[in-house]
Image (cartoon, rainbow, N blue to C red):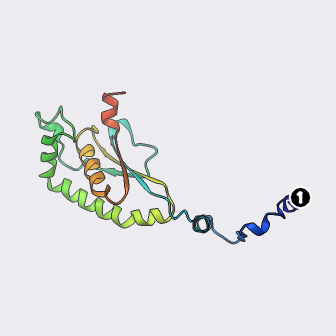
């Protein structure tokens, strides 16, 4: 350490010294960002649909269950479609529980995402599951992405759809 101090003695006056011995890492991170004029990092949201029959995504920050909402799979004309197809969207848009679920989750995320961003998190994955991962969870992930896309950087992924159409 003494040798390092000697080597840096000539440039020490050009820098800033911050005593970090009593700082929490979060506070230090904010100080360094402020010092460098970087501001807070941007939070990216990933809304990811999945099928419970294939397991919960291990990389999810939040896992939300949509299996209590009416399942379009049991409507023969909707079965081959997905939550991105207009007939399924119309079906779920009429479902009271689907709309209540969306309202509740929007409120939850609207309340807590600013707090998560203040913690300098760079990304949050919200995984939404249903039985097959094709209808309800896809529809809900798409609706949430649309709802939060104006305020946050948003990505959408559909594990259930990717499994049947691998790239």
- The kind of secondary structure element at disc 1 is helix
Where is the C terminus found, in terms of image quarters? top left
Q: Who's the residue at 27% across and 45% down the image?
A: 137
Query: How many numbered badges does the structure rendering display?
Result: 1
Where 74 falls versus 28 (above or below)? above
Image x and y of residue 11, in percent: 79, 63
Q: Who's the residue at 25% across and 38% down the image?
A: 134
Q: How would you rate the neighbour count of disc 1 (Cα within 10 Å): few for under 14, some for 14-19, many for 20 or more?
A: few
Residue that label 1 marks: 3
Where 38 falls versus 138 (above or below)? below
Where is the N terminus found, in terms of image quarters? bottom right
Image x and y of residue 151, in percent: 34, 60
Answer with left or right where residue 122 lies relative to residue 33. left
Which residue is nearer to you in this view: 160 or 25?
25
Answer with left or right where residue 152 lies relative to residue 7. left
Image x and y of residue 85, in percent: 18, 39
Q: Who's the residue at 35% across and 37% down the image?
A: 159
Answer with left or right where residue 133 lies relative to residue 120. left
Q: Who's the residue at 70% across and 70% down the image?
A: 18
Which residue is nearer to you in this view: 24 or 57?
24
């Amino acid at each position: 350490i003494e040798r390092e101090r000697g080597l840096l003695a000539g440039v020490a006056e050009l820098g800033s010294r911050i005593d970090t011995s009593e700082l929490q890492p979060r506070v230090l991170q904010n100080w360094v960002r402020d010092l460098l004029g970087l501001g807070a990092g941007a939070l990216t949201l990933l809304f990811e649909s999945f099928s419970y029959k294939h397991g919960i995504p291990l990389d999810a920050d939040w896992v939300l269950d949509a299996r209590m909402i009416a399942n379009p799979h049991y409507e023969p004309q909707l079965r081959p479609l997905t939550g991105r197809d207009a007939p399924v969207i119309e079906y779920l848009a009429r479902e009271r529980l689907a709309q209540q679920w969306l309202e509740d989750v929007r409120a939850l995320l609207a309340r807590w995402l600013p707090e998560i961003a203040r913690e300098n998190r760079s990304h949050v994955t919200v995984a939404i599951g249903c039985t097959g991962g094709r209808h309800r969870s896809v529809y809900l992930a798409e609706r949430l992405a649309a709802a939060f896309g104006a305020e946050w950087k948003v990505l959408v992924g559909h594990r259930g759809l990717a499994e049947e159409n691998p790239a």
